[in-house]
Amino acid sequence: MSEQSNALQAALERWNAGDLAGYLKLYDERIRLYGYSPAPLDKEEVRAFYQAIFDAFDGPQLEFHETLWEGERCSVRFTMTGTHVAAFMGVPATGLPVALPGITILHFEGPRVLERHSSADMLGLLVALGAVPAAA
């Protein structure tokens, strides 16, 4: 396994153990995360975004379905699961289980991610939580 692959595997293990601080070690201090807000998130905003997920979903778990590498770049197709136990994106707790699929591209510099581009089915999540009506 490469240094980057080891770092990614360690981050996945830390996330699934509920260790947000351990997970965040994957990201360089100069991280720019695109896809979850109009402007890229910096390290503190990344921390706050994921803290909101840990607060809103009881024991969120990540499963990687496919991981593709090209040099220091990696693409991951994933699903995050959890139970909605506190407000998220303005939606009060529902107690509902959720499964949020997504895909991300990670740009590494050494063992840390310097840039990340992500897309997740946030509309599907809002439908599952009852905040948005399902299409007829």
Image (tube, grey):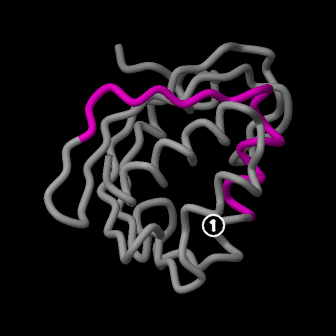
Q: Residue at x 41, y 68 (%)?
A: 34
Horizontal side of 112 relative to 105 (left or right) equals: right
Measured along the vertical axis of the image, is residue 44 above or below residue 74? below
Boundaries of the magenta span: 48-67
Residue 98 is a magenta residue: no
Q: Residue at x 71, y 44 (%)?
A: 53
Tally of numbered tags: 1
- Residue 55 lies, in percent from the top left, at 83, 42
View extreme (left): residue: 70
Q: Is residue 51 or residue 90 the one in the foreground?
A: 51
- Residue 119 lies, in percent from the top left, at 36, 49
- Residue 115 lies, in percent from the top left, at 39, 73
On the image, numbered disc 1 is attached to which residue? 46
Measured along the vertical axis of the image, is residue 74 above or below residue 25? above
Label 1 SS: helix
Q: Residue at x 42, y 76 (%)?
A: 114
Horizontal side of 29 relative to 119 (left or right) equals: right
- Look at label 1 and name its amino acid: Val
Q: Is residue 90 or residue 7 the one in the foreground?
A: 7
Picture quarter with the C terminus: top left
Snapshot quadrant of residue 15: top right
View extreme (front): residue: 1
